[in-house]
Amino acid sequence: MARHHALTHESALSHEGFDLEDEPVEADERAPFVSMLNKAEGSMESHLQTTRPVQEITSHKSPPIYTQSSSDACLKLRSVLPEYDLLISTLSKNGAWWSSFRHKTEVICQGSYEGLAAFAARAYTSSDPAELGMLVVAYARSTGHHHHLYGVVDRLAIPDSGHSYSAEAMELLLLLAKAYSDIGQPRQSWLMYRKGLAISEVMGLYRREMVSPRLKSIWWAFYHGDRFSSLLLGLPYGFNDAHLGPTVEPYNVPTYPEQRFVLRCASIAGKIIDRNMMPGKPSSASSMLLDEQMDTIASSMHTGMFGSFSATA
C-alpha cells in the first residue's frame, strides 16, 4: 500500500471504545468546491461546515447518538435475540467461524481480538445499536439460518447519511459483508464493502495525514474487501491505487509478511480488474506481466503460510 500508510497493531474489530470525533479528519482543501467555500467571505456558516471534521458535519435534524432513536433501535434488535442463556449456548456451540473471521482481520491489522463469548456478554446490554447489531449478526450466522436478520440489522443499526459513523458502525459493515459472503450472497457482500469504502473516503480515512491505527485498519479492510468482491463479480473497484502514492505498499516498522502479502494481492486484483474492464481482447503481454507479478508475490512468502490461510478459509 502507500508508503505513508502505516498498518495497525490494533484490530479493526477491537472492543475498545472509540469515537471518530477524536480524530481531526478535515475536508480536503485541494477539492475545488471546498477551496471555494473556505475562501468565501461573509459566510461563516459555510466556513464552519467545510473546516469542521467531516464526521461532525451532520444534519441539524439528526439526533445525536444514543438518543431515543438509538434506544428504540436497541430494543428492536434485542427483541430478535433469544434469551441470554440460549444465546450464549448457541454461540458457544456454533461460533467457531468467529475466530476465523477475526483471524482474517488480524492478518490485515496485526492486532488482538475479543472472543465471541466475551463480546456477547458485553454487547447484550449495550446501548450502541452498532454493537448490538454485531451480536445479532453473530447469532444469525451461528444458527445457520435466520439470515433475514442481516437486513434487519442493516436497517436498524447502520446510520443513514445524516448521521455520524462510529468505528463500531464501520466494523458492523465489515461483519455484514463477510456474513453475506458466507451465505452465498456476493452481491450483498459487495454492496456492504462498497458502502463502507465510500463512507471511509468521505471521512478521509485514505489520506496519509491520518495517523490512527484503528482508522487505518478499517480503511484497509474495506479496500481489501472491495477489491476481491469486485473481482469476483466482474465489477469495477471503488478506489484507485494512484491516489495512494507511487507504491501500494504498507509502510511500517516492522513490516509483517502477512500484511504485505494480503495487500499486495489486493493491489494485483485491481490490476486484473483493469485488464478485464478494457474494451476488446486483453493483450497476452499484459496477462503475462500480471502472472509474473503474482508469482513474485507468492515466492516472497514461506510455503507454510498458505497452509495457515487454507485452514482459516
Image: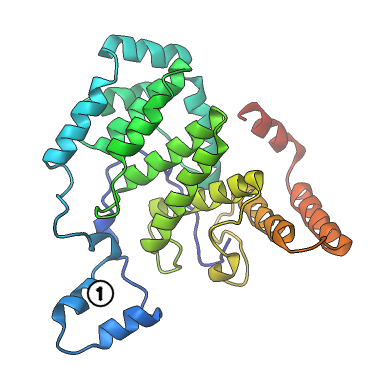
Question: In the image, is residue 250 above or below residue 126?
Answer: below
Is residue 259 shown left or right of residue 75?
A: right
Residue 12 coordinates in the image, percent (x, y): 42, 44
Residue 258 coordinates in the image, percent (x, y): 62, 45
Q: How many marks?
A: 1
Q: Quadrant of the C terminus?
A: top right
Residue sitting at x 38%, y 39%: 172
| Closer-to-camera residue (141/9) | 141
Question: In the image, is residue 106 above or below residue 299?
Answer: above
Q: Quadrant of the N terminus?
A: bottom right
Residue 144 coordinates in the image, percent (x, y): 48, 17
Q: Specify the amino acid type for callout 1.
A: Thr
For residue 126, say whether it is visible. no
Specify the farthest residue to the right. Answer: 284
For residue 136, say whether it is visible. yes
- Residue 69 in which image quadrant: top left
Is residue 292 shown left or right of residue 154?
A: right
Is residue 311 shown left or right of residue 171?
A: right
What crowding class fits label 1: few (fewer than 14 Cα within 10 Å), some (14-19), or many (20 or more)?
some
Residue sitting at x 73%, y 56%: 276
Element class at badge 1: helix
- Residue 80 in which image quadrant: top left
| Closer-to-camera residue (305/242) | 242
| Closer-to-camera residue (291/17) | 291
Q: Which residue is mark 1?
A: 51
